[in-house]
Image (tube, helix red, strand yellow):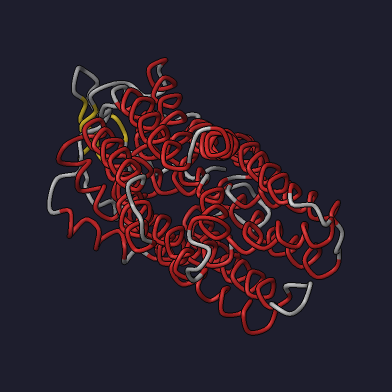
């Protein structure tokens, strides 16, 4: 049995009005402009993949810039001040999702995402003219993150609007662009810095992002009219729902611990191997894993159900961190861990979108997804500094990162508990046992 509280269609002409079956849906009436699950719906998914590949690829390539800033350009500046650039990129991208829902409702997906590509392009070009770390924080950190927020959440939401039968698969394909972009743009950025210059790498990435993302955004359009009424009232209605609270807390805890393997495993691998290239190879394997996991999220969700998928994947993340970070201290083990963790850890991106669209209706998916992404931002803002303090206090003088690993285990355990409560809430509503698919 699968979750199904989508609105019933009453009239199907050029415009279709439907009543929501779910009593707590923020808007009981849905106006549809086109049929779902058409060929155009898959074109939207491909456009979203390209949009997220360029946007997330640019953000994920910051690791290359961070190494260049720390070792070459700003070697005398504090590593903490430089790390704030990456923290603010993620924070602004996620928290900006609160406002993108309102912008999408007012201006549509196309204009909102195109505007994001313009802001990102300007941010990167401005960053190429900076000469201080605080200037990079403003441009490559805050401005780039806010521009990315105009692309990230809407690109996930628009796919959910256009698909009903294969929503998780389509969303998984779209968010897989982040992993593909992470692999391609990191290598490309490193090559441009080595063969051209650091400043021109930023300018080229900015122009490339504007070209690809701007063109992809032109494919976006509404399939469903936005919910009527105040956006603030809508957000409040969604935010106080117990099911959304479970999802919000879960994604917050996930992002509080998610970056521990991503930031510290490459360092451990370099210590074990003595080769600097091991670090970039570990990141490459991790990004490949995230790409595979996001594509497979639809199949896994279909087999065991979306609520079960979230519960199982977070339990496995917790288990993998325990086994590989505390028990296995070899380079081969770190490669295996990066592949497994990368595959499992990002399943929630596509699955949560599916659950939100079904539980609250596709007409409010932009607002519900944006609000959940804001909770991801809170997790990033809290988790990264805490891990930094734990590392400086307990792990810096050791070759094992036990303190930051324990933090990651605790975060994924908390996320698992939240998804367990969500599974109970949804299962009780549909009268489904713990051993059935939902």
Q: Where is 329 relative to 336, above or below?
A: below
Residue, far top: 39
Which x, y percent locates residue 129? 32, 47
In the image, what residue occupies the spot 69% across and 52% down? 341
Nearer to us in this view, 142 or 346: 142
Q: In this rendering, would 320 be left or right of 56?
A: right
Q: Where is 223 relative to 337, above or below?
A: above
- Give the quarter of the image for residue 163: top left
Which x, y percent locates residue 322? 76, 68
Q: Where is 51 relative to 134, above or below?
A: above
In the image, what residue occupies the spot 50% across and 52% down? 430
Nearer to us in this view, 17 or 357: 357
Q: Quadrant of the N terminus?
A: top right
Q: Is residue 97 visible?
A: no
Which x, y percent locates residue 428? 51, 60
Q: Where is 57 relative to 337, above or below?
A: above
In the image, what residue occupies the spot 26% across and 34% down? 109
Q: In this rendering, would 260 be left or right of 222?
A: right
Q: In this rendering, would 36 be left or right of 182?
A: left
Q: Is residue 413 visible?
A: yes
Residue, far bottom: 393
Which x, y percent locates residue 122? 28, 40
């Amino acid at each position: 049995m699968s979750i199904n509280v989508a609105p019933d269609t009453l009239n199907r002409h050029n415009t279709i009005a439907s009543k929501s079956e779910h009593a707590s849906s923020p808007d009981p009436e849905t106006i549809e402009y086109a049929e779902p699950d058409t060929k155009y719906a898959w074109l939207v998914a491909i456009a979203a993949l390209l949009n997220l590949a360029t946007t997330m690829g640019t953000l994920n390539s910051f690791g290359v810039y961070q190494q260049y800033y720390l070792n070459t350009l700003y070697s005398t500046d504090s590593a903490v001040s430089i790390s704030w650039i990456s923290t603010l990129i993620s924070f602004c991208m996620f928290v900006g999702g609160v406002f993108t829902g309102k912008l999408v409702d007012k201006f549509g997906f196309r204009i909102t995402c195109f505007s994001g590509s313009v802001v990102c392009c300007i941010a990167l070009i401005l960053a190429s003219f900076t000469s201080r770390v605080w200037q990079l924080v403003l441009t490559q950190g805050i401005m780039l993150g806010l521009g990315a927020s105009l692309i990230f959440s809407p690109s996930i939401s628009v796919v959910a609007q256009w698909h009903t039968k294969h929503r998780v698969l389509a969303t998984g394909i779209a968010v897989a662009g982040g992993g593909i972009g992470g692999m391609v743009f990191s290598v490309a950025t490193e090559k441009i810095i080595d063969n051209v210059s650091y400043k021109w790498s930023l300018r080229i990435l900015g122009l490339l992002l504007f070209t690809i993302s701007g063109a992809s955004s032109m494919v976006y359009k509404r399939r469903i009219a936005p919910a009527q009424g105040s956006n603030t009232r809508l957000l409040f209605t969604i935010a106080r729902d117990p099911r959304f609270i479970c999802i919000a807390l879960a994604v917050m805890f996930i992002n509080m611990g998610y970056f521990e393997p991503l930031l510290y495993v490459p360092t451990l691998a370099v210590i074990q191997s003595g080769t600097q290239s091991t670090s970039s190879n570990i990141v490459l394997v991790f990004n490949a894993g995230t790409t595979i996991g996001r594509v497979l999220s639809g199949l896994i969700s279909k087999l065991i159900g979306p609520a079960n998928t979230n519960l199982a994947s977070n339990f496995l993340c917790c288990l993998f961190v325990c086994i590989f970070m505390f028990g296995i201290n070899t380079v081969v083990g770190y490669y295996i861990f990066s592949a497994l963790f990368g595959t499992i850890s990002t399943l929630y991106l596509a699955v949560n979108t599916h659950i939100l669209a079904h539980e609250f209706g596709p007409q409010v998916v932009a607002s519900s997804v944006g609000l959940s992404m804001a909770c991801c931002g809170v997790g990033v803002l809290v988790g990264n500094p805490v891990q930094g303090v734990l590392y400086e206090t307990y792990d810096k003088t050791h070759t094992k990162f036990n303190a930051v690993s324990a933090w990651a285990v605790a975060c994924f355990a908390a996320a698992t508990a939240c998804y367990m409560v969500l599974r109970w809430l949804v299962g009780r509503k549909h009268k489904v046992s713990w051993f059935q698919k939902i």
